[in-house]
Amino acid sequence: MSIGYVALVLHAHLPFVRHPESDFVLEEEWLYEAITETYIPLLRVFQGLKRDGVDFKITMSMTPPLVSMLRDPLLQERYDEHLGKLEELLVKEIANNSKHEHDGHIKYLAEYYAQDFAEIRKIWEHYKGDLILGFKEFLDSGNLEIITCGATHGYLPLMKMYPQAVWSQIKVACEHYEENFGRSPKGIWLPECAYYEGLERMLADAGLRYFLTDGHGILYARPRPRFGTYAPIFTESGVAVFGRDHESSQQVWSSKVGYPGAAEYREFYKDLGWEADYDYIKPYIMPNGQRKNIGIKYHKITSKTGHHKDLYDPYWAKRKAADHAGDFMFNRELQVSKLADMMHRPPLVVSPYDAELFGHWWYEGPWFIDYLFRKSWFDQNTFAMTNLAEYLQNNPTQQVAKPSQSSWGYKGFHEYWLNETNQWVYPHLHKAAERMIELANREPADELEWRALNQAARELLLLQSSDWAFIMRTGTMVPYAVRRTKSHLLRFLKLYEDIKAAQIDSGWLSKIEEMDNIFPNINYRTYRSI
């Protein structure tokens, strides 16, 4: 009989990047890389666990932009072509590295990747390119609890002066979830785990039962929770709050002691797209001839300090992932045992991570998850792996407290999304929200105005994505984030002016409806006063 619980929570999110107007946009490959390296590998893990009788429990958020992209026929077609080019390149790699005896290890790796991509292709075709069907399969079986997020990952504390805008982020997300999964979501991953006091009332009104916050959101709650982050609290609205456990997070995330930095693991930054002969690799890089990552990597981390990198070996990397899963399990056993003695009730350790860490950034991450579930199922009985909905169902009595304003960003509050790199965005966001609330009180004169009003709501939601401010702060791909911010703002402003003047350009509207086609069933009236 277990004396505590461990809840693994993965946040699966990418910004909505879809460009039918162009044959190639580099940022679309964020999705293709994540499908190959994270989403299909996770489905493969789930399938294997189910096949072998491991009754695993895990929670995943799947944000509306990600779900929309995974179900989009254009992006599915482009991913299929992307995977086909990788398969074609590996045929060449195997042939080229068969000619020289000293290239035997690279040939072995090319053959390994060819087999890996063949398995990815098999899963891709099994679900006919619609991976949401795969995740829904495990949702329906009770193993995977899928929760929602803000409609476009909008940073809610920085729009709280416009409750209608916050409500629309929540309401549109819940409706989109129901359209895609056939049921209402029970929980929500607040974008960036960013919470402000009073938000829980809107979550309750939307029918949501729980959300996650960083640890200090609970530790600084009023009154101070008796069990810290090792039990959820209930807000006065009845919505539960789960806090992140920093001990288990550090074991994975820490740049100094975290697992992904092990010498045996694959080196992310040495990629064939940058290292192969230019004329040879040119058909597989950007159309303008600029090099890029292509996802075939032959080296391991080797050392955190030296520049020399040895060749990768998936056999030893998999062994290391098993060791790390065992270490993670052992530490959770110690942690749960110690907490149970102090708390005199079963503790809950909540371990949330970005899903893309597992596979994309940390190639061996899906193996780690696989081993962790198997070892926890067969090799110990100190804790049970659970998902958050199951935990609440089995533990319905918790302390009532008011959580503290918080996020899991830099320094724990809001400055990562509001600083000198991105502060120029917010006056425009606020003015656009004001104008959308104004538009929401209109009744459309005809079908064309109805479409324009709904498109204005889409453009505002896309403009509010926290990803653009985040990218501006990180300093990578900044021109793209600025361009996206300005393009959605300008589209919204044109729609606003055209609607007010009763001069809607139907041809232009059709064009942007095709480009920004997220939330096909949106109703602009969600922006009316609440």
Image (tube, rainbow, N blue to C red):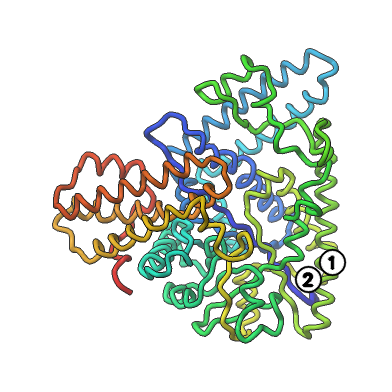
Q: Residue at x 60, y 36 (%)?
A: 121
Residue 295 picture location, percent across and down:
65, 33
Give coordinates of residue 101: x percent, y percent.
85, 16
Query: Looking at numbered disc 1 in the image, what kind of residue is underneath it?
Result: Gln
Secondary structure of residue under mark 1: loop
The answer to which of 256 and 334 lies nearer the viewer is 256
The reply to whether discs 2 and 1 touch (Cβ–Cβ < 8 Å) is yes
Q: Nearer the viewer, residue 251 or 157?
A: 157
Q: CA distance from mark 2 to mark 1?
A: 8 Å
Residue at 84% over, 75% down: 337
Specify whether 121 is left or right of 51.
Answer: left
* Quadrant of the frame with the C terminus: bottom left
Which corner quadrant holds the N terminus?
bottom right
Residue picked out by circle 1: 380
Q: Is residue 404 above or below residue 413?
A: below
Q: Amino acid type of disc 2?
A: Phe
Q: Choose top left, top right, bottom left or bottom right for residue 440.
A: bottom left
The reply to whether residue 125 is visible in this rendering is no
* Residue 443 spot, x, y in % from top left: 18, 63
Q: Is residue 431 left or right of residue 323?
A: left
Q: Position of residue 281 (x, y in %)?
A: 62, 20
Q: Residue at x 48, y 57 (%)?
A: 153
Mark 2 is surrounded, within 10 Å at the Cα level, by few (under 14), some (14 to 19) or many (20 or more) other residues, namely many
Q: Is residue 449 left or right of residue 216?
A: left
Quadrant for residue 109, please give it.
top right
Give residue 383's mark: 2
Answer whether residue 480 is visible to the viewer in this image.
yes
**Above or below 213: residue 287:** above
| Depth check, front residue: 109 or 454 | 454
